[in-house]
Amino acid sequence: MPETVTKGRYFIGANTSAGFVNYTDEILCGLDRVYIIKGGPGTGKSTLMKRFAAYAEERGHTVERYFCSSDSDSLDGVVLRDAGTGIIDGTAPHCADPKYPGAREEIVNIGRLWDTGLLRGRFDEIKTLCDRKSGLFATVYKYFSVCRSLRTEREKLVSGCEKSDKAEAAVHRLMERFGRGGGFRLIPRQISAVGMNGVCNFGTFAENADEIWLISDRRGIAGDFLGMMIKEAGSLGLETHISRDHLLEPDALYFPEKRIAVVSDCDAGKATRIINTDRFIDGAGLSEHRAALRFLKKLENELFSRALSLFGEIRTCHFAVEDIYRGAMDFGGLEPVFEQITAGL
């Protein structure tokens, strides 16, 4: 069964407690033709794909745009599911290589347009910046990993006070009216990311939905509740799109067959239903752990803020490298590339 056609903005991956998570394979699944762009930073990949997306929309195609999780202004992929076509940045950290060369994927090498002599002459500068940037990302991921451990400790305390049976019954009541779907699949579609522009949420699930269900969650059990919804979706055979936070907890779901979004972050005025998870918690029992929960949450917030601050230096390194490559490129050579990738539309 082909994936439901949607539109809007997503992220190609995510900076998480497990490092960089790359969703390229899931994004490209089911496509007939894929262009994999190889090149360096600042070589025009994002601009090329933005032109491709605009060109496709002008011709009536539904466009999915996939942005860089570290730079939410930079486009890393475009998918036209109605045309079975995609174009994606195949360079690190979201590396992609052909699985069926020529039969499905084509490599588009724009590295042939740069001045190798100029770049070799600035090797030491490029290496210093790239190595510093990699080291900063490694530190961010370590901080996120500790945040994950702290959240796990909080979840252990809360779980003893969670009324799971009541929550599962509520999920069943909410979703039984959906009826049967065409077959369960859990499809990653990342709509939130942490990067150089801070915490970004595209809100794409809500934009595609007829109904928006907002989870009001003061106790930190939204991930559990969404997990129960995924299990119920499996029983009903519903295609389910999932987005996760930086600690890999579910933070939003979309059921495209029903056009229903379930989110933990949106304007409450746009929500058609608000689900208050407080009713699934034994408040009296939780009060015994209040001091410990506050302490763990404070530590997690401080570590997260520190990790977020490192993206300022990551930004400096990133754009310094881009400037070097930009000065070494023959951008006029991208026009034949654009004609190549749009020829079949």
Image: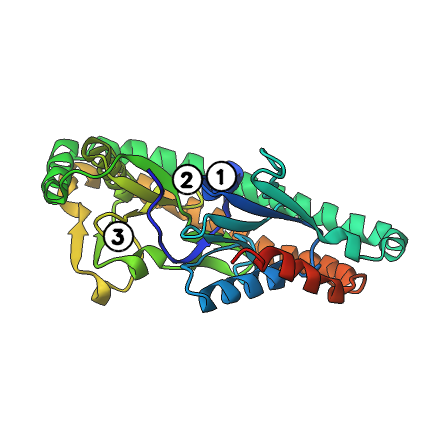
Q: CA distance from mark 3 to mark 1?
A: 25 Å
Count residues near mark 3 (Cα–Cα under 10 Å), then give few for <14, some for 14-19, many for 20+: many
- Which amino acid lies under the numbered mark 2 shown in the image of this protein? Leu
Q: CA distance from mark 3 to mark 2?
A: 19 Å
- Which amino acid lies under the numbered mark 1 shown in the image of this protein? Ser
Question: Callout 2: helix, strand or loop?
Answer: loop
Name the disc covering residue 17, or none.
Answer: 1
Name the residue rendered at 49%, 43% in the picture: 32
Percent x, y for residue 113? 78, 57
Percent x, y for residue 33? 53, 45
Left or right, 139 with respect to 279, comes to right
Q: Is residue 335 above or below residue 244?
A: below
Question: Callout 3: helix, strand or loop?
Answer: strand
Going from the N terminus, do you reach mark 3 or mark 2 first? 2
Residue under label 2, please give it. Answer: 248
Name the residue rendered at 22%, 53% in the picture: 216
Residue under label 3, please give it. Answer: 261
In this view, the mark in front (3 or 1): 3
Count residues near mark 2 (Cα–Cα under 10 Å), then give few for <14, some for 14-19, many for 20+: some
Going from the N terminus, do you reach mark 3 or mark 1 first? 1
Q: Toward the viewer: 345 or 180?
A: 345
Q: How many marks?
A: 3
Q: Are marks 2 and 1 in contact (CB under 8 Å)?
A: yes
Question: Callout 1: helix, strand or loop?
Answer: loop
Q: Toward the viewer: 118 or 142?
A: 118
